[in-house]
Image (spheres, rainbow, N blue to C red):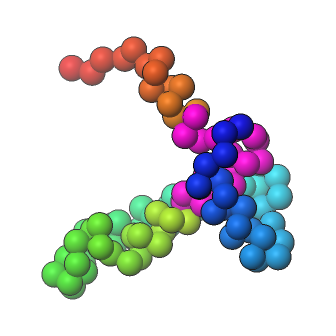
Amino acid sequence: MTSSEGSALSALQIASHGKDRYPTPKAQAEKLVIEAAELLGAIAEHANSRTHQRNHSLADCPLVRGELADVGLCLYALGNKVQIDPITAMRELVDRDQRRFA
């Protein structure tokens, strides 16, 4: 597995918590799905809120940024558990993807 900043940040966060609350790949994958749903909720809330839209863009929305960070940390924690670097896996998929969409 290739070392990446995402993997290191995820491991650092788990270490700073003192315990891995999602110690198995299955538990970590379930947590990833929950965090992805929370990200969807944050994006929907921003899209439906005139206050949010007036005060900041989606890219600058603290709630969206925080939830996206949570998703990334969960993804890298899962990668660490299954010994697959997400960036390496994505690169491999993109390199062999021959699909074309019209």
- Tell me the residue at 65%/53% (across/down): 7
Q: Nearer the viewer, residue 46 or 8?
A: 8
Image quarter in which the C terminus is found: top left
Which of the 4 quarters of the picture holds residue 46? Answer: bottom left
Residues in magenta, as a range: 71-88
Task: Point out residue 9 in the picture as x, y percentages from the top left corner.
Answer: 63, 63
The residue drawn where x is 46% and y is 21% is 95
Across and down, in percent, residue 53 comes to: 20, 76
- Residue found at x 58% / y 34%: 88
Q: In the figure, 22 relative to 75: above or below?
A: below
Q: Is 45 or 25 nearer to us in this picture?
A: 25
Residue 90 horizontal side relative to residue 17, left or right: left
Exactly how many numbered labels are in the figure? 0
Residue 34 in percent (x, y) is at 59, 61
Residue 25, image x, y percentages: 77, 48
Position of 87 relative to 51 (above/below): above
Q: Nearer the viewer, residue 25 or 16?
A: 16
> Residue 48 in magenta?
no
Can you see residue 29? Answer: no
Q: Quadrant of the N terminus?
A: top right
